[in-house]
Image (cartoon, coloured by chain):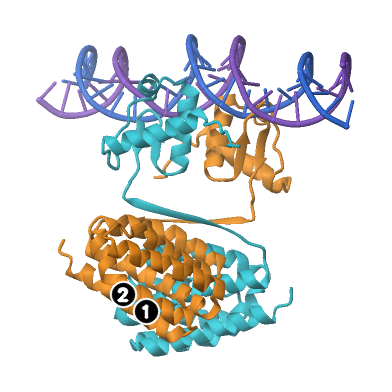
Chain colours: A orange, B cyan, C blue, D purple
Amino acid sequence: MKKIQKIHLYEQVSQELQNYIQEKELKEGDKLPSVDRLTEMFGVGRSSLREALRYLEANEIVKIENGKGVFVKDMDTFRFTGKVKIEIERNSLLSILDVRRALEGKAIELAARRITSKQIKEIEACLNEYRRLKEGGQSTSKIDLAFHQLLIKAAANPILESVLNSFSVLYNKFFDKPLGNTQLFDATYPFHFTMFEAIAAHDVPKALSEFDKLMNSLEEIIKAYEV
Amino acid sequence: MKKIQKIHLYEQVSQELQNYIQEKELKEGDKLPSVDRLTEMFGVGRSSLREALRYLEANEIVKIENGKGVFVKDMDTFRFTGKVKIEIERNSLLSILDVRRALEGKAIELAARRITSKQIKEIEACLNEYRRLKEGGQSTSKIDLAFHQLLIKAAANPILESVLNSFSVLYNKFFDKPLGNTQLFDATYPFHFTMFEAIAAHDVPKALSEFDKLMNSLEEIIKAYEV
DNA sequence: CCTGTTCACCTATCAGACAGGTCAATCATA
DNA sequence: TATGATTGACCTGTCTGATAGGTGAACAGG
């Protein structure tokens, strides 16, 4: 039994449009024919065509600009996507943590190697602010995020940065809920400073071992967390 | 001067729809009101609404089924996306390689810890096939991919697997072109076996050091590659 | 040279109409 | 009674004509 599946018009059209772009070798910013012409070319109605365009726009293949036309988006920009089904439970959290270990660990290794004195000063300022907020009993979630982002920047690897940034959304989303922010930040607080010192001193092994301690303390929290 | 930007109707509608889903706490598979009702609810025309739906469908938030209605997709499935602008040049390749080091290195560490005897046999079979193809002078790109995927599976971390899989698309896309497949596979060939042996023996440090050698040889190739 | 008008060309959005998919209740028949 | 066809309510799919409004170039007047 073969599964017969209807192919929606808008889907065919979006396929054809992509072929069109490929065949004509259109590059970023090139203009596609107007909607009216495209409906003639493909022999479909305006609505189907517009749905196809909207679909492609959502997938960042084209950009529709009012009054101007439809334009090709940068094809050299590579988009990676992935989906992860997650229930909030110990194993998922531990799995996420492992990925963070891998990614951010590498970032810290690179940062310890490549950090500039200017970046060191920036992070120092950030940590001072961190301390100030902490001692004032205020929320440290934003400043914590800023700290880690500065570190990632210091790693000077744009691809790692991109992967890590998109991953951190996942990370924050699933760590905020079960484990309170306070708990998280309290446990990791001291390691921020020791780790930074090692990075500033370009001491790669020390930085990594401090990062490991930080992660270990998170792991402890998760393991102690009862579902 | 503030940049005034028009918010398209379809965009507002798609926002509202997402709010609607959140507020009503709709879960996977739940049905949304029909298009006609939604047009009434939001006071917009059919086409705007359909474009909004198509947009959400492209973003995997809803699924439109002909004759049935519009359904919510799994909201617990987290989608991470990122984009990377890349020119094919040494630095980009090295940056990509660093990310692979981080991600696949972690996978190998976990695999060496958790691999089962069944998985060991599978990978053994894979490597035998690898050797056969290699000696027969045939293309080893597919079998190489299969090998790495089996290793990743053995790491038993679904999130790492997902991130790594989406990343490997990027990886392959940008490594195939400048550096010939043959060159790539020749250099890394021997390490596949030594690394596997270490993993099968649950020898984590050895596995990692073999992986490091493999990555180093890739790095050499890239560095020797003249733009 | 600068400025405002006009016009051709586009996209944005709506409303109405018809085609066709889906499902369940209903009804006819063996 | 059981089975299978029919019908009708409820959807989405698609087309079309109309109107509104954004954009930029050409053009005319100061």
For the point 35% across and 60% down, the residue is: A171
For the point 26% across and 67% down, the residue is: A186
Residue A16 is marked as none
**In the shown orientation, is residue B75 left or right of residue A70?**
left
Q: Which chain letter matches label 2? A: A
Image coords of residue A113 (percent x, y): 53, 80
Instruction: Give the vertical position of B214 relative to B139 (above or below).
Output: below
Instruction: Give the vertical position of A105 relative to A62 (above or below).
Output: below
Q: Camera-side residue: A178 or A181?
A: A181
**In the shown orientation, is residue A83 left or right of residue B133?**
left
How packed mark 2 is, by other alpha carbons closer than 10 Å (few <14, some 14-19, many 20 or more), is few
Image coords of residue C3 (percent x, y): 78, 23
**In the shown orientation, is residue D20 left or right of residue C17?**
right
Residue ID for mark 1: A194
Whether the residues at callouts 1 and 2 have beta carbons within 8 Å, the answer is yes
Q: Camera-side residue: A56 or A187?
A: A187
- The amino acid sitting under disc 2 is Pro
- The amino acid sitting under disc 1 is Thr
For the point 50% across and 75% down, the residue is: A111
Residue ID for mark 2: A190
Quarter of the C terminus of chain B within the rendering: bottom right
Quarter residue A194 falls in? bottom left
Q: Which chain letter matches label 1? A: A
Q: Camera-side residue: B55 or A45?
A: B55
